[in-house]
Amino acid sequence: MARKRTAKHPKPTEPEAQPQGGGQEGHGIAPSDPDAISKSQAAREAIAAGVEAPDDAVEFIRKKFGIEMSKAHFSAVKSQTKKKADAPKAKRGRKPKAVVEGYLAPPPKLEPTGEGDLLDALAAMKPLIAQYGADKVKKMVDLLG
């Protein structure tokens, strides 16, 4: 799009009058009224009163507080209020590492070196042979090694 053309020497304009006290204009709140509440607070009070339909809530807020509010604004406040109520309070930061009780590091893996007591190995195999038979134990050994 083309830019608007401006004059080389624009006429000075007078600044718009600012309201005294820096009130919250556009929010339906008079700056000097200490009992006035915000639109969001009015919407939260309507929800607390059990009025959750946007049409009914806007009418409720207009009658009770004298505040004009759009249905979309009410729905947005309602959504944010429910989101904050449902969200769990999570702790920020890193999660601690899992601690295995009794170990600082995993135990080293043992590799067979061929050394060891042959009689102890045979004594450990005796109950296996009694339970499964010599042929099955031989097949088990063949599968493993």
Image: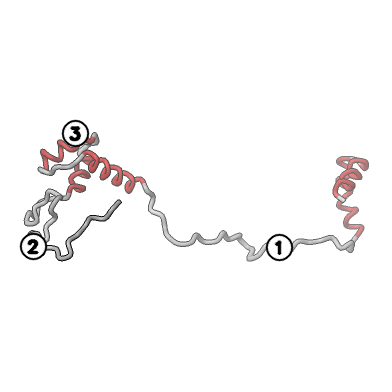
- Residue in the picture at 18% in, 45% down: 42
Residue 43: image location, x then y, percent: 20, 43
Q: Quadrant of residue 138?
A: top right
Looking at the image, is mark 2 or mark 1 nearer the viewer? 2
Sequence-earlier tag: 2 or 1: 2
Which residue lies at the image location 88% right of the left edge and 50% below the top edge? 125
Q: Reading the chain from its start, which is encountered first: label 1 or label 3?
A: 3
The disc placed on residue 117 is: none
Q: CA distance from mark 1 to mark 3?
A: 68 Å
Label drawn at residue 56: 3
Q: Residues within 10 Å of mark 3 (few under 14, many from 20)?
A: few
Nearest the camera: 100 or 2? 2
Rendering coords of residue 140 (x, y %): 87, 45
**Mark 2 vs mark 1, CA separation in Å:** 82 Å
Q: Check disc 1 and report the residue beneath it.
A: 107
Query: Is 113 displayed left or right of 43 in the figure?
Result: right
Q: Are marks 2 and 1 in contact (CB under 8 Å)?
A: no
The three-letter code of the residue at mark 1 reads Pro
Query: Is the residue 9 above or below the residue 35 in the image?
Result: below
Find numbered disc 2 in the image and state the secondary structure of the residue it sits on.
loop
Give the residue pinned by disc 2: 14
Q: Secondary structure at mark 1?
A: loop
Residue type (three-letter) at the residue carrying disc 3? Asp
